[in-house]
Structures are given as structure tokens and as C-alpha cells.
Amino acid sequence: MKISTQIQYGLRSLCDIAYNSAGSPAQVRCISERQGLSPRYIEQIFQKLKKAGIIRSIRGPTGGYYLTRRPEEITVGDVIRAVDGKSIQLVFCSGDRRTAKKACDRYGKCVFSDVWGEASKRLMDYFNSVTLNDICEEAREKGVGI
């Protein structure tokens, strides 16, 4: 299992806003420079984050993007669901029943789907417990930037 680059870059960009913007709107150009990411790619990801209500934008020369909630209220799980449209499932048979039934000829006859389902649940529980603020605090404690 791999976390998509959109999730990784979306999380990095949101943490950049939380860490560096002090409540002011952050411009994609600045985030792009600090993170070494394509501004175009950030904009694509931000469209999904806007649709999910995690960020908003302000137009104009002093505009940019800002978080709609405090960093301690936005979790890694929120970002995953906003970008991918669903929670992480380690294997296809641990997710939606209809999809799993179509994709696996052993669906309903395999004990491993319970193992993978529980592992997926625990992973998402962890992601739902880690906030942008937690990540920013860890960066400050380690003396590294975001």
C-alpha cells in the first residue's frame, strides 16, 4: 500500500499553511517554493480540498488559501478522504461490499478479509487521530521546517 502523492503533497501544503501563514492567506507560489512542488499540481489538489471544505480562497493580490478550521481540528484522515474520496483500504476486499464481491471470487469465503478490514480500520483510526497541529508541533520540537 502506498499513500498517493496527491495525499502527501496535499498534507504538506496544508501543514505549510498552518505552520507558516499565521492565519493569513497563503499564496500557492509561496507554498510551491517552500515545498519544492509544482504550483499547478498544488492547485489541482487544492480544488479537492476546497470542495471538501478544508480550505477556502480569497482572490486578489493579497489573497490566497486559508484553512477553514483550526489546525488542531483537521486530521490526516480528513485530508485522505478529501483527496481520494474515501478512507484507505489496505486491500480491495476490505472495503465496500459491492466492490469487493465483484473483485474477489473468494468474497465471503475468506478469513483474511476480516484481518485486512481490521488493519484498515486501525490505520484510519490513527490517521483520524493525527492533526495538522500535531505535525506542526513535532516540526517545531525537532527544529525542522515544514
Image (cartoon, rainbow, N blue to C red):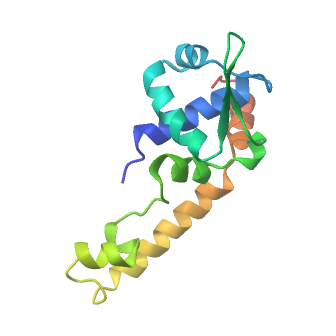
Residue 118 % position (x, y) = 49, 74
Tell me if 70 is positioned left or right of 96 in this view. right
Tell me if 91 is positioned left or right of 73 in this view. left
Q: Residue at x 49, y 46 (%)?
A: 83
Tell me if 85 is positioned left or right of 16 in this view. left
Q: Residue at x 50, y 27 (%)?
A: 43
Residue 89 in which image quadrant: bottom left
Q: Is residue 113 above or below residue 82?
A: below
Q: Nearer the viewer, residue 126 or 144?
A: 126
Q: Residue at x 80, y 24 (%)?
A: 22
In the picture as drawn, the residue positioned furthest to the bottom comes out as 109
Residue 138 % position (x, y) = 70, 36
Q: Is residue 24 above or below residue 68?
A: above
Q: Would residue 104 be seen by someone viewing this image from the given angle? A: yes
Residue 58 % position (x, y) = 69, 24
Q: Quadrant of the C terminus?
A: top right
Q: Nearer the viewer, residue 120 or 101?
A: 101
Q: Would residue 37 be seen by someone viewing this image from the given angle? A: no
In the picture as drawn, the residue positioned furthest to the top comes out as 61
Residue 50 % position (x, y) = 60, 39
Q: Quadrant of the N terminus?
A: bottom left
Residue 28 in which image quadrant: top right
